[in-house]
Image (spheres, rainbow, N blue to C red):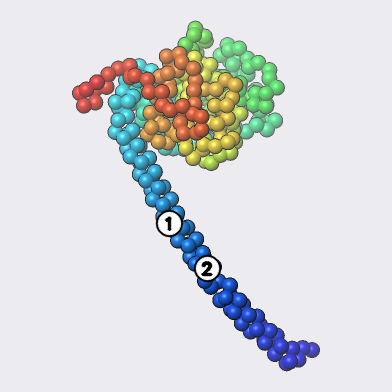
Amino acid sequence: MIDFRYHLVSIIAVFLALAIGLAVGSTALSGKAVEFLNAQERRAVASNASLTKHNQALTNQVAADQAFAQAASLRLVGGLLAHEKVVLVVAPGADNAVTAGVINILRQAGATVTGQVGLTPSFLTTTGNAEAALTQLAQNLAAKHGLAPPAPSENPVAGQQAAAQLLAASLLDSPSGGTTLSVKASADILSGLEQTGYVTASPQTPAPATAAVLVAPGGLAPQTGSEVLGAVAAQLKEASGSATVMAGATESVGQDSVISNEKNSPDPVSTVDNADTESGQIMVAQALRYLLEGKAPAAYGIDSGNAPSPAPTPSVTSTAGGHP
């Protein structure tokens, strides 16, 4: 049993330790030591204030740049895509600001947005059973409409590749004399993919388009689905004669993002990684114009190594303000 003397000694030891700590602290931190620490504190406070001011200045600059881009968008893109027809293919989890902004800028550029096709999470599933089911569906739809069956492939996303080939054929006009599906065949292919839960379409049968925008998933990198969406981009590119752009939001910039993986692929489509901003949306329209003129795909936006806006000259004079 612990007696009273043990407790008394413990209490005395605690107070003795406190006294020694106060004595040592008051002497060790006096004079030059205190002056040094105070100087360090002042420098840290000043540095933080400077960084806060600089950050606010950058925020204001970005806001001003985007306000300018929004105000000048009609002059920058007016008539750029006159008489062109563009379809949107939207990945699961895509940023709504990207989709809405791209549709708006395409219309400002004079394009007709023929429709919007959403890929479902099921389309991105790459398990063995999912691949087999999607491959079989693609083979059945191809045979029904007299199209060449998907070539056998060991690719882990062969099912999506086969389905994407049919999807692209149903959405886009062939620019080089390839097979152009009838309206009925296109509608039937879309219906087959929609009824099995792989896509959603609005309207149910979009008119044939001459170009495509693939909206990448939102969210922070790394992202899943790069290989599947790369296969979709490749089929859209082939069906449109290269006039395909992949667009995503600034939040998604980074290693292993869908857009980063696409721009580093062997045969990429054009990419825009800041299409949630006014300037990025303008780039989408400009990049499509470049592709329609036969120029090579390129990466645009804010990621390291990307090109700035290509800024091609509008093909039709804008009427904004009554000046060219």
- Look at mark 2 in the image and give the residue it sits on: 32
Percent of width and height locating residue 236: 52, 20
Percent of width and height locating residue 142: 59, 16
Q: Residue at x 59, y 33 (%)?
A: 225
What's under tag 1, amino acid-wise?
A: Ala
SS for callout 2: helix
Q: Residue at x 39, y 43 (%)?
A: 58
Q: Is residue 107 toward the left or the right of residue 229 in the image?
A: left
One can see residue 200 in this view: no
The quadrant of the picture occupied by the C terminus is top left
What's under tag 2, amino acid-wise?
A: Lys
Judge by depth and name the residue closer to the eye, 204 or 225: 225
Q: Residue at x 33, y 39 (%)?
A: 64
Point out the residue furthest to the top here.
Answer: 177
Percent of width and height locating residue 131: 66, 28
Q: Is residue 188 toward the left or the right of residue 64 in the image?
A: right
Point out the residue furthest to the left here.
Answer: 322
Q: Residue at x 52, y 19 (%)?
A: 237
Point out the residue furthest to the front here.
Answer: 32
Badge 2: how crowded within 10 Å, few (<14), some, or many (20+)? few
SS for callout 1: helix
Point out the residue furthest to the bottom here.
Answer: 4
Question: Considering only vertical position in the picture, is 150 above or below 283?
Answer: above
Judge by depth and name the residue closer to the eye, 229 or 142: 229
The quadrant of the picture occupied by the N terminus is bottom right
Badge 1: how crowded within 10 Å, few (<14), some, or many (20+)? few
- Look at mark 1 in the image and give the residue it sits on: 46
One can see residue 269 in this view: yes
Percent of width and height locating residue 28: 58, 72
Circle nearer the viewer, 2 or 1: 2
Question: Considering only vertical position in the picture, is 148 above or below 212?
Answer: above
Quick one: label 2 or label 1, which is nearer the N terminus? 2
